[in-house]
Amino acid sequence: MRFFISSDIKKNRTLYFAVLFFMVFSFLFWLSSWLHFYAKYTFSYEGLVKYFFTDPEYPERISISQLSEDLHVSLFLHSFILLVLFSLFNLVAKDSKLKSFSVVLVFSLATFYILSDLLIYFLNQPAFVWLKFASFIIYQTSFIIVWLYTLFKILNAKPPSNSSLRLLVFLFSIFSLIFFLSNFLNFYSKMGLNPEGIRNYYLGNPQLFIKKKTFEGVFKVFYPHLLAMSIYCLTLAHLLPFAGLRQKTGFYLGILLFTFSSIDNLSSILILYTSSGMAELKLLSFICFHLIAFYCCLVLLRASVKKGEFPALYV
């Protein structure tokens, strides 16, 4: 995304139309969010209670495993669409205070909307399901306002300000750290943090009434993660020079991010068709990837709160 934040998109016709296509698809994503919310919860109190507590007369909470999986997906999707949208918004908005306020507001609303699932789960009171509905409406409204403003101002794009970029990187790093925590929660709730739990999850265990995973089921997870994790690793590695990290260090960190994320993803299939010892490989790659990505986010956080220019901002 260097071209979004360090050049004039009007001078690059290919980039200009790519930006317009992104705006179209992000609008379709926004529309789909309403359909997704309706299909999952409906727009009624009864529907929300049914999702989180099954039956109002016989309350049974949704599993933490399901919630952590939803958090895992939502944090990834919304962090990236907001990162790109606000990179464009940063080009067209002139008032630095408006940009900073908008970035903080929308990222905060998105965070509260996504984490409201956990809030409802731990409060364990059906009345609090309205938090999900209210946070969804407010977040989606703020999103479309920023989207409309960006769309109508895109022809008058101006060079970005350093302060807004700094804030955007800071909030993306915060989202990433929350994403790591949700990913650990998702992994632990399904498999635990030990090889035996991983083997049971994929190969099954009759004594624990756990069915063996099918190739179709594993591949449905493997396939989208090929793209999702490559985009995430690319973004992290791409932002590291902005934090003043040496190119050689950033290069090796990027290689490690791609390597361990790929092994983690591929090992799920290998466990089914090769040695069960691949469970150790999956656990090792999962931990290594998150430790390296966590370190990268801390580097970005440190750079975003330091005074001065991002060293590679206009290179």
Image: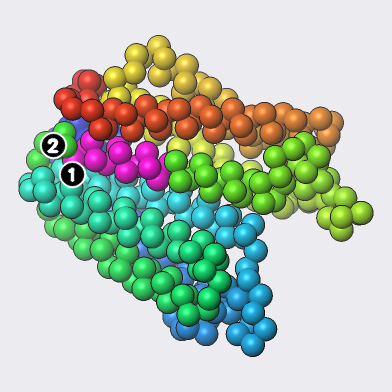
- Marks 1 and 2: CB-CB under 8 Å? yes
Residue 190: percent from the left, percent from the top?
69, 51
Q: Rounded to the nearest whole Å, what is the CA distance between mark 1 and mark 2?
A: 7 Å
Q: Nearer the viewer, residue 214 or 298?
A: 298
Quadrant in which the C terminus is drawn: top left
Q: Is residue 283 visible?
A: yes
x and y percent of residue 258 in the render?
Answer: 53, 27
The residue most toward the top is 248
Determine which quarter of the picture holds residue 283: top right
Q: In the visual, does 133 lie left or right of 302?
A: right
Q: Residue at x 15, y 43 (%)?
A: 91
Q: Secondary structure at mark 1?
A: helix
Residue 187 left/right relative to 136: right
Q: Label 2, on which residue?
A: 161
Outermost residue toward the bottom in this view: 57
The residue lying at 22 percent from left, 45 percent from top is 88
Q: Residue at x 30, y 39 (%)?
A: 170
Q: Quadrant of residue 265?
A: top right
> Looking at the picture, which amino acid does disc 2 mark?
Ser
Mark 1 is surrounded, within 10 Å at the Cα level, by few (under 14), some (14 to 19) or many (20 or more) other residues, namely: many
Q: Is residue 166 magenta?
A: yes
**Which residue occupies the foreground of this view, 219 or 97?**
97
Point out which mark residue 53 bears: none
Residue bearing the label numbered 1: 90
Q: What segment carries the magenta color?
A: 164-176
Which is nearer the N-term, disc 1 or disc 2?
Answer: 1
Three-letter amino acid code of the residue under disc 1? Asn
Residue 302 at x, y = what percent? 32, 29
